[in-house]
């Protein structure tokens, strides 16, 4: 694992967009693990620009999203289905819909949905690249502190800090879903290559925990220390002081 400070979120986001574009260019049937949230906005903006300028054929690219809120329909304005459509799939509408996979947080039977999604990852994967953000408390996906390191796709209860951090996307905090369907930590580790991005001073403490190179169940992202190919890119504000 290597932590690299690229100075700004724009530089880091452009780098990751280039890596995704390169992967898709070189392997037209790539499997990509995608993340959402504010950290990823610039990544997808740069990626769409690269795809448009080069008119890349992405019909064989298969994507798997990390997570989705429980209780939100795919069309809800704050669902991650809607996020992905608005920021990537509708802006470059050449992906094959049947190869786009996002957990269904509105499924009638959530336990069946988590099994379906994990089975899909096992059947179709592994991911060639999995991109990740990180929560202020060190969560990846929605795997909160204390998550079993061997966890697979599951329904998770969101912590107060995560709910508070995500409340900026809703009219008020009471509207933020309290649960999510998320790839588990073991699910994430199945990827061949993992790229994590962290921007802003609020993420610095979590990155400093990673810089200690000690696996800590209370900082879920430290499970990445067990993976052989992890790259972490930060801006000045998130760079560890250690």
Image (cartoon, rainbow, N blue to C red):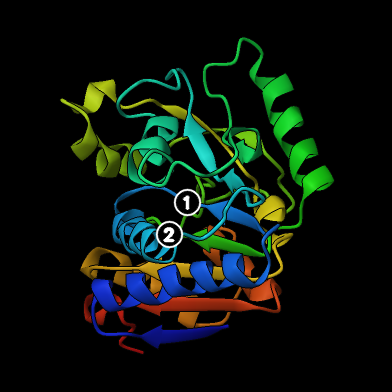
Percent position of residue 129, x then y: 61, 65
Which is in the foreground here, disc 1 or disc 2? 1
**Neighbour tally class for label 2: few under 14, some 14-19, many 20 plus, Cα within 10 Å:** many
Image quarter (top left, top right, bottom left or bottom right) of the C terminus: bottom left
Residue 136 seen anywhere in this rendered image of the structure? no
The residue at 48%/23% (across/down) is: 70
Which quadrant would residue 107 be assigned to in this image? Answer: top right
The residue at 51%/49% (across/down) is: 141
The residue at 26%/72% (across/down) is: 9
Percent position of residue 94, x then y: 50, 44
**Whether residue 238 is situated above or below residue 203 in the rendered picture:** below
Q: In this view, does 160 lie to the left or right of 103?
A: left
Image quarter (top left, top right, bottom left or bottom right) of the N terminus: bottom right
Who is closer to the viewer here, 224 or 101? 101
Which quadrant would residue 85 be assigned to in this image? Answer: top left
Who is closer to the viewer here, 117 or 54? 54
Q: Which residue lies furthest to the top in this view?
A: 108
Earlier along the polypeptide chain: callout 1 or callout 2?
1
Residue on which disc 1 sits: 35
Marks 1/2: CA–CA distance = 7 Å
Dot 2 falls on a residue whose secondary structure is loop
Q: In this view, does 145 lie to the left or right of 191?
A: left
Labels 1 & 2 near each other (Cβ < 8 A): yes
Dot 1 falls on a residue whose secondary structure is loop
Which quadrant would residue 181 be assigned to in this image? Answer: top right
Q: What's the mark number on residue 105?
A: none
The residue at 22%/70% (across/down) is: 201
Who is closer to the viewer here, 177 or 54? 54
Residue on which disc 2 sits: 133
Percent position of residue 66, x then y: 55, 45
């Amino acid at each position: 694992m290597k932590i690299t400070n690229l100075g700004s979120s724009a530089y880091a986001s452009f780098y990751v967009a280039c890596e995704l574009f390169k992967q898709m260019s070189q392997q037209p049937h790539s499997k990509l693990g995608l993340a959402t949230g504010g950290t990823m906005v610039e990544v997808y903006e740069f990626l769409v620009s690269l795809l448009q300028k080069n008119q890349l054929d992405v019909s064989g690219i298969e994507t798997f999203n990390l997570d989705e809120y429980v209780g939100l329909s795919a069309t809800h304005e704050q669902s991650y289905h809607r996020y992905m459509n608005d920021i990537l799939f509708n802006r470059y509408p050449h992906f094959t819909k049947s190869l786009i996979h996002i957990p269904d947080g509105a499924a009638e039977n959530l336990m069946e949905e988590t099994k379906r999604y994990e089975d899909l990852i096992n059947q179709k994967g592994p991911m060639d690249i999995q991109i990740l953000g990180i929560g202020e408390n060190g969560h990846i996906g929605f795997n909160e502190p204390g998550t079993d390191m061997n966890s697979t796709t599951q329904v998770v209860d969101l912590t107060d800090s995560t709910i508070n951090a995500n409340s900026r996307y809703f009219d008020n905090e009471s509207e933020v879903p309290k649960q999510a369907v998320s790839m588990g930590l073991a699910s994430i580790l199945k990827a061949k290559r993992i790229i994590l991005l962290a921007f802003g001073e609020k993420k610095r403490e979590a990155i400093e925990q990673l810089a200690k190179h000690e696996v800590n169940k209370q900082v879920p992202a430290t499970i990445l220390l067990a993976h052989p190919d992890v790259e972490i890119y930060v801006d000045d504000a998130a760079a560890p002081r250690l």
